[in-house]
Image (tube, rainbow, N blue to C red):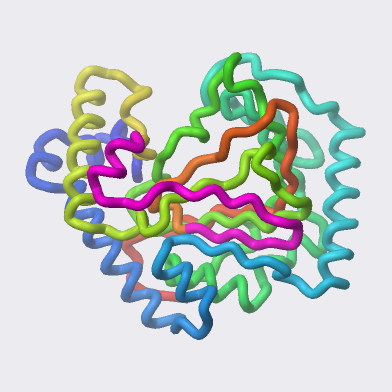
Amino acid sequence: MKVFSDPWVGHPGLNRMGLHRKRLKTAQAISRFRRAQTVRVRDADEQHLLDHGFVAIENFLPTDEFAAMEAECHGAAEAAAQATAIPEKPEVWGFGDSDRHDWGFDRFDGSTLNRFIKPGPLAKAFPRNPRFKRLARLVTGKTMSPRRNWLYQTVNGDEAEIPDQQREFHRDTFFNCMKYWYFIDPVTEDDGPFVYVPGSHKLTLERLDWEEKKAQSAVEARIAKNRREMTGSFRIEESEMEAMGLPPAQSYPVPGNTLVVANVFGFHRRGDAVPGTRRLALYGNHRPQPFIPFGS
């Protein structure tokens, strides 16, 4: 569990004894142990992922395979739009509930719509790509399940009207986990490209101290019954990252047929965007149980 509303994760006495710090260090050690069992770095892209916490690989699929994937994904997105019109704005602020349909589901993050569409045959098979599987193992030491794979359309909302919390710098949870975006269409600076802080996936002493302070704040929020602040997806200000000695965040506009893989224990966010712009990608969230020592 990552949320501090959990009675053990948010236990005041256990956290005074260093529970959060111990969980972090144990999860990192197990992740390294699993990786050693399953994969070794063999090219520059894999080393970049290990060193910096992310990698963007252009021309990931051969031209003919990408053309077929592009046609399938555009067809699926158009079919979903014909079945269910894209909603203009959310009914509530914050992370919205899923509105489910035969083709998948819609969910708002603030003003930004996330449309998750069931993948077609080619998209469904993407996580079985041998090169992709190696990248997943480098982050977690485990193979990603193909069931965690979606066709993902992002429709950027108006930040001035309803803020999107995904545009705040954050880390997803307390252990190494992976997200990926295989972009079907080009992503420009106007489209809200992925933003990542290189090297922020490393568990340094400065990071440990910051984590402990955030954990204590979450414990205090649990005592005060402030549910919004009990999250285990910690937010961070740029000044705090500077104090840790981290480099500036980098934005990654990319052409189509680009795979972006990130260790989302590192600090990242969704980039600023022009309202109404869209991104289309395959997407997956790979978050294996952190305390199982066996790789796969």
Q: Position of residue 287 (x, y in %)?
A: 47, 56
Magenta stretch holds residue 136: no
Question: Residue 2, relative to residue 36: is it above or below?
Answer: above
- Tell me what residue is drawn at x 22 percent, y 43 percent: 210
Q: Nearer the viewer, residue 247 or 213?
A: 247
Position of 58 compared to 178: left or right?
A: right
Quadrant containing the N terminus is top left
- Tell me what residue is drawn at x 35 percent, y 54 percent: 200
Q: Position of residue 194 (x, y in %)?
A: 57, 47
Point out the stretch of residues depicted in magenta. 237-262
Question: Residue 102, relative to residue 143: is it above or below?
Answer: above
Q: Position of residue 208 (x, y in %)?
A: 20, 51
Question: Residue 24, relative to residue 88: is it above or below?
Answer: below
Q: Position of residue 15 (x, y in %)?
A: 14, 41
Q: Nearer the viewer, residue 153 or 187?
A: 187
Magenta stretch holds residue 239: yes
| Total labels drawn | 0
Q: Nearer the viewer, residue 187 or 70?
A: 187
- Tell me what residue is drawn at x 18 percent, y 34 percent: 216
